Amino acid sequence: MNWVATSTLLKKEVMRWRKVWLQTVLSPVVTALLYLAVFGHVLEGRVEVFPGVSYAQFLIPGLLMMSVIQNAFANTSSSLIQAKVMGSVVFVLLPPFSALELFLAYIGAAVLRGMAVGVGVFLVALFYVKVPIENIFVVLAFGLLGSYVMGAMGLLAGIWAEKFDQIASFQSFLIVPLTFLSGVFYSINSLPRFWAEVSRWNPFFYMIDGFRYGFFGQSDQPVVMSFVIMASAALLLTIFCVRLLSAGYKLRDA
Protein backbone atom coordinates (compact mmCIF):
# COMPACT_ATOMS: atom_id res chain seq x y z
CA MET A 1 0.00 0.00 0.00
CA ASN A 2 1.21 3.47 -0.95
CA TRP A 3 -0.36 5.38 1.93
CA VAL A 4 1.06 8.72 0.78
CA ALA A 5 -0.68 8.40 -2.57
CA THR A 6 -3.92 7.25 -0.95
CA SER A 7 -3.95 10.07 1.60
CA THR A 8 -3.16 12.64 -1.12
CA LEU A 9 -6.09 11.56 -3.27
CA LEU A 10 -8.28 11.37 -0.18
CA LYS A 11 -7.34 14.95 0.74
CA LYS A 12 -8.14 16.08 -2.79
CA GLU A 13 -11.56 14.40 -2.69
CA VAL A 14 -12.36 15.86 0.75
CA MET A 15 -11.35 19.35 -0.39
CA ARG A 16 -13.66 18.93 -3.39
CA TRP A 17 -16.78 18.69 -1.23
CA ARG A 18 -15.55 21.01 1.52
CA LYS A 19 -15.15 23.92 -0.90
CA VAL A 20 -18.86 23.78 -1.74
CA TRP A 21 -20.07 22.90 1.79
CA LEU A 22 -23.25 24.95 1.38
CA GLN A 23 -24.36 22.46 -1.27
CA THR A 24 -22.74 19.27 0.03
CA VAL A 25 -23.34 19.60 3.79
CA LEU A 26 -25.72 22.41 4.71
CA SER A 27 -28.30 21.71 1.98
CA PRO A 28 -28.98 18.06 3.02
CA VAL A 29 -29.13 19.12 6.68
CA VAL A 30 -31.84 21.66 5.86
CA THR A 31 -33.73 19.09 3.75
CA ALA A 32 -33.72 16.55 6.60
CA LEU A 33 -34.97 19.17 9.05
CA LEU A 34 -37.82 20.11 6.72
CA TYR A 35 -38.90 16.44 6.68
CA LEU A 36 -38.69 16.38 10.46
CA ALA A 37 -40.69 19.57 10.87
CA VAL A 38 -43.47 18.49 8.49
CA PHE A 39 -43.86 14.80 9.43
CA GLY A 40 -43.09 15.39 13.09
CA HIS A 41 -45.73 18.11 13.34
CA VAL A 42 -48.42 16.20 11.45
CA LEU A 43 -47.97 12.77 13.08
CA GLU A 44 -46.64 13.63 16.55
CA GLY A 45 -49.00 12.23 19.18
CA ARG A 46 -50.90 10.17 16.59
CA VAL A 47 -48.34 7.42 15.93
CA GLU A 48 -46.28 5.41 18.41
CA VAL A 49 -43.96 2.95 16.69
CA PHE A 50 -41.90 1.82 19.69
CA PRO A 51 -43.15 1.88 23.30
CA GLY A 52 -42.02 5.04 25.05
CA VAL A 53 -40.62 6.61 21.85
CA SER A 54 -42.37 9.60 20.32
CA TYR A 55 -42.79 9.74 16.56
CA ALA A 56 -40.39 12.68 16.26
CA GLN A 57 -37.74 10.71 18.14
CA PHE A 58 -38.38 7.66 15.95
CA LEU A 59 -38.05 9.80 12.83
CA ILE A 60 -34.66 11.36 13.57
CA PRO A 61 -32.42 8.25 13.19
CA GLY A 62 -34.13 7.38 9.90
CA LEU A 63 -33.69 10.88 8.50
CA LEU A 64 -30.13 10.96 9.77
CA MET A 65 -29.19 7.70 8.06
CA MET A 66 -31.06 8.68 4.90
CA SER A 67 -28.96 11.84 4.69
CA VAL A 68 -25.74 9.92 5.37
CA ILE A 69 -26.23 7.27 2.69
CA GLN A 70 -27.58 9.60 0.00
CA ASN A 71 -24.63 11.97 0.38
CA ALA A 72 -22.06 9.17 0.51
CA PHE A 73 -23.48 7.88 -2.77
CA ALA A 74 -23.53 11.35 -4.31
CA ASN A 75 -19.92 12.04 -3.40
CA THR A 76 -18.27 9.15 -5.23
CA SER A 77 -20.68 9.08 -8.16
CA SER A 78 -20.46 12.82 -8.86
CA SER A 79 -16.68 12.92 -8.42
CA LEU A 80 -16.03 10.09 -10.87
CA ILE A 81 -18.52 11.13 -13.54
CA GLN A 82 -17.26 14.71 -13.38
CA ALA A 83 -13.68 13.51 -13.87
CA LYS A 84 -14.74 11.32 -16.81
CA VAL A 85 -16.78 14.03 -18.55
CA MET A 86 -14.10 16.71 -18.08
CA GLY A 87 -11.30 14.32 -19.05
CA SER A 88 -9.41 14.84 -15.79
CA VAL A 89 -9.72 11.16 -14.85
CA VAL A 90 -6.46 10.64 -16.74
CA PHE A 91 -4.60 12.48 -13.95
CA VAL A 92 -5.79 9.82 -11.51
CA LEU A 93 -5.04 6.90 -13.81
CA LEU A 94 -1.51 7.98 -14.82
CA PRO A 95 0.12 7.91 -11.34
CA PRO A 96 1.07 4.45 -10.00
CA PHE A 97 -2.08 3.96 -7.91
CA SER A 98 -3.24 0.44 -7.25
CA ALA A 99 -6.95 -0.30 -7.59
CA LEU A 100 -7.25 -0.73 -3.81
CA GLU A 101 -5.58 2.62 -3.16
CA LEU A 102 -7.99 4.37 -5.52
CA PHE A 103 -10.94 2.63 -3.91
CA LEU A 104 -9.94 3.51 -0.35
CA ALA A 105 -9.38 7.18 -1.21
CA TYR A 106 -12.76 7.61 -2.92
CA ILE A 107 -14.62 5.66 -0.23
CA GLY A 108 -12.84 7.50 2.57
CA ALA A 109 -14.00 10.86 1.20
CA ALA A 110 -17.56 9.54 0.80
CA VAL A 111 -17.64 8.25 4.38
CA LEU A 112 -16.33 11.56 5.74
CA ARG A 113 -18.94 13.56 3.82
CA GLY A 114 -21.75 11.23 4.85
CA MET A 115 -20.74 11.34 8.52
CA ALA A 116 -20.33 15.13 8.41
CA VAL A 117 -23.89 15.49 7.12
CA GLY A 118 -25.13 12.99 9.73
CA VAL A 119 -23.51 14.88 12.60
CA GLY A 120 -24.97 18.13 11.28
CA VAL A 121 -28.49 16.68 11.10
CA PHE A 122 -28.22 15.21 14.58
CA LEU A 123 -26.91 18.38 16.24
CA VAL A 124 -29.55 20.62 14.70
CA ALA A 125 -32.33 18.07 15.35
CA LEU A 126 -31.50 18.18 19.07
CA PHE A 127 -33.07 21.64 19.15
CA TYR A 128 -36.31 20.02 18.01
CA VAL A 129 -36.43 16.93 20.24
CA LYS A 130 -34.02 15.05 22.50
CA VAL A 131 -33.08 11.59 21.23
CA PRO A 132 -31.55 8.96 23.54
CA ILE A 133 -28.51 6.98 22.45
CA GLU A 134 -28.69 3.44 23.78
CA ASN A 135 -25.43 2.20 22.24
CA ILE A 136 -23.04 4.67 20.60
CA PHE A 137 -20.89 1.86 19.15
CA VAL A 138 -23.86 0.43 17.23
CA VAL A 139 -24.70 3.92 15.96
CA LEU A 140 -21.13 4.47 14.73
CA ALA A 141 -20.84 0.95 13.27
CA PHE A 142 -23.97 1.27 11.15
CA GLY A 143 -23.22 4.88 10.23
CA LEU A 144 -19.79 3.90 8.93
CA LEU A 145 -21.05 0.71 7.24
CA GLY A 146 -23.95 2.52 5.59
CA SER A 147 -21.80 5.31 4.20
CA TYR A 148 -19.14 2.77 3.11
CA VAL A 149 -21.67 0.63 1.23
CA MET A 150 -23.31 3.61 -0.43
CA GLY A 151 -19.95 5.14 -1.31
CA ALA A 152 -19.09 1.87 -3.06
CA MET A 153 -22.43 1.88 -4.88
CA GLY A 154 -21.77 5.46 -5.96
CA LEU A 155 -18.38 4.38 -7.27
CA LEU A 156 -20.03 1.63 -9.31
CA ALA A 157 -22.53 4.13 -10.70
CA GLY A 158 -19.73 6.55 -11.57
CA ILE A 159 -17.75 3.82 -13.33
CA TRP A 160 -20.78 2.66 -15.32
CA ALA A 161 -22.23 6.06 -16.25
CA GLU A 162 -21.03 8.08 -19.21
CA LYS A 163 -23.19 11.19 -18.72
CA PHE A 164 -24.52 13.19 -15.78
CA ASP A 165 -28.12 12.30 -16.59
CA GLN A 166 -27.33 8.60 -16.16
CA ILE A 167 -26.15 9.30 -12.60
CA ALA A 168 -29.32 11.31 -11.99
CA SER A 169 -31.45 8.44 -13.30
CA PHE A 170 -29.59 5.94 -11.12
CA GLN A 171 -30.27 8.09 -8.07
CA SER A 172 -33.88 8.95 -8.95
CA PHE A 173 -35.06 5.47 -9.91
CA LEU A 174 -33.03 3.31 -7.52
CA ILE A 175 -31.43 5.10 -4.58
CA VAL A 176 -34.26 7.46 -3.62
CA PRO A 177 -37.11 4.88 -3.90
CA LEU A 178 -35.17 2.24 -1.95
CA THR A 179 -34.34 4.83 0.72
CA PHE A 180 -37.93 6.04 1.16
CA LEU A 181 -39.25 2.45 1.24
CA SER A 182 -36.74 1.28 3.85
CA GLY A 183 -38.55 2.31 7.01
CA VAL A 184 -37.36 5.89 7.37
CA PHE A 185 -40.86 7.14 8.18
CA TYR A 186 -42.50 3.96 9.48
CA SER A 187 -41.90 0.51 10.96
CA ILE A 188 -42.27 -2.34 8.49
CA ASN A 189 -44.27 -4.17 11.17
CA SER A 190 -47.07 -1.68 10.48
CA LEU A 191 -47.28 -2.84 6.85
CA PRO A 192 -49.44 -5.67 5.49
CA ARG A 193 -47.59 -8.98 5.65
CA PHE A 194 -46.81 -9.10 1.93
CA TRP A 195 -45.23 -5.63 1.84
CA ALA A 196 -43.38 -6.27 5.09
CA GLU A 197 -41.78 -9.33 3.49
CA VAL A 198 -40.93 -7.33 0.36
CA SER A 199 -39.27 -4.68 2.54
CA ARG A 200 -36.94 -7.31 3.97
CA TRP A 201 -35.39 -7.66 0.52
CA ASN A 202 -34.46 -3.98 0.58
CA PRO A 203 -30.83 -3.69 1.76
CA PHE A 204 -31.40 -0.09 2.86
CA PHE A 205 -33.88 -1.36 5.45
CA TYR A 206 -31.08 -3.11 7.35
CA MET A 207 -28.96 0.04 7.38
CA ILE A 208 -31.71 2.12 8.94
CA ASP A 209 -33.11 -0.56 11.23
CA GLY A 210 -29.73 -1.41 12.75
CA PHE A 211 -28.85 2.28 13.04
CA ARG A 212 -32.14 2.96 14.85
CA TYR A 213 -31.40 0.12 17.29
CA GLY A 214 -28.33 2.05 18.45
CA PHE A 215 -30.60 4.89 19.59
CA PHE A 216 -33.52 3.04 21.17
CA GLY A 217 -32.38 -0.54 21.74
CA GLN A 218 -35.41 -1.59 19.66
CA SER A 219 -35.67 -2.62 16.02
CA ASP A 220 -37.81 -4.55 13.56
CA GLN A 221 -35.07 -7.12 12.89
CA PRO A 222 -32.33 -8.60 15.12
CA VAL A 223 -29.45 -6.13 15.06
CA VAL A 224 -26.89 -8.92 14.57
CA MET A 225 -28.65 -9.99 11.35
CA SER A 226 -28.61 -6.42 10.07
CA PHE A 227 -24.91 -6.09 10.86
CA VAL A 228 -24.00 -9.35 9.11
CA ILE A 229 -25.97 -8.37 6.00
CA MET A 230 -24.34 -4.93 5.85
CA ALA A 231 -20.84 -6.28 6.46
CA SER A 232 -21.35 -8.90 3.73
CA ALA A 233 -22.58 -6.22 1.31
CA ALA A 234 -19.53 -4.08 2.11
CA LEU A 235 -17.16 -6.98 1.43
CA LEU A 236 -18.81 -7.96 -1.87
CA LEU A 237 -18.92 -4.38 -3.12
CA THR A 238 -15.27 -3.88 -2.18
CA ILE A 239 -14.20 -6.91 -4.21
CA PHE A 240 -16.36 -5.91 -7.20
CA CYS A 241 -15.22 -2.26 -7.22
CA VAL A 242 -11.53 -3.13 -6.88
CA ARG A 243 -11.76 -5.58 -9.77
CA LEU A 244 -13.45 -3.01 -12.01
CA LEU A 245 -10.87 -0.36 -11.11
CA SER A 246 -8.08 -2.84 -11.71
CA ALA A 247 -9.46 -3.67 -15.15
CA GLY A 248 -9.97 0.01 -15.99
CA TYR A 249 -13.56 -0.69 -17.03
CA LYS A 250 -15.00 2.42 -18.74
CA LEU A 251 -12.13 4.49 -17.32
CA ARG A 252 -9.12 3.98 -19.58
CA ASP A 253 -11.10 4.98 -22.67
CA ALA A 254 -12.98 7.81 -20.93
Image (cartoon, helix red, strand yellow):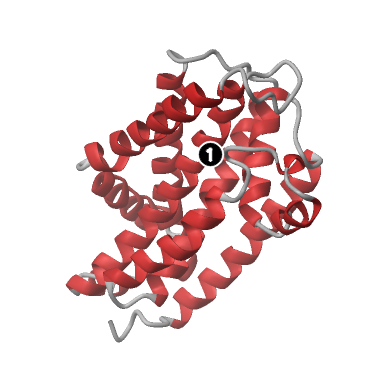
| Mark 1 secondary-structure assignment | helix
Q: Is residue 6 above or below residue 173?
A: above
Q: Is residue 30 above or below residue 221?
A: above
Whether residue 135 can be seen here = no
Q: Quadrant of residue 221?
A: top right
Residue occupying the point 31% across, 73% down: 93
- Give the percent coordinates (x, y) of residue 225: 79, 47
Q: Is residue 58 above or below residue 180?
A: above
Q: Nearer the viewer, residue 218 or 183?
A: 183
Q: Quadrant of residue 160?
A: bottom left
Q: Is residue 73 above or below residue 163?
A: above
Residue occupying the point 50% across, 25% down: 42
As shown in the figure, which amino acid type bears the numbered disc 1? Met
* Neighbourhood count class around disc 1 (C-alpha, 10 Å): few under 14, some 14–19, many 20 upward: many
Q: Which residue is mark 1?
A: 65
- Give the percent coordinates (x, y) of residue 189: 76, 41
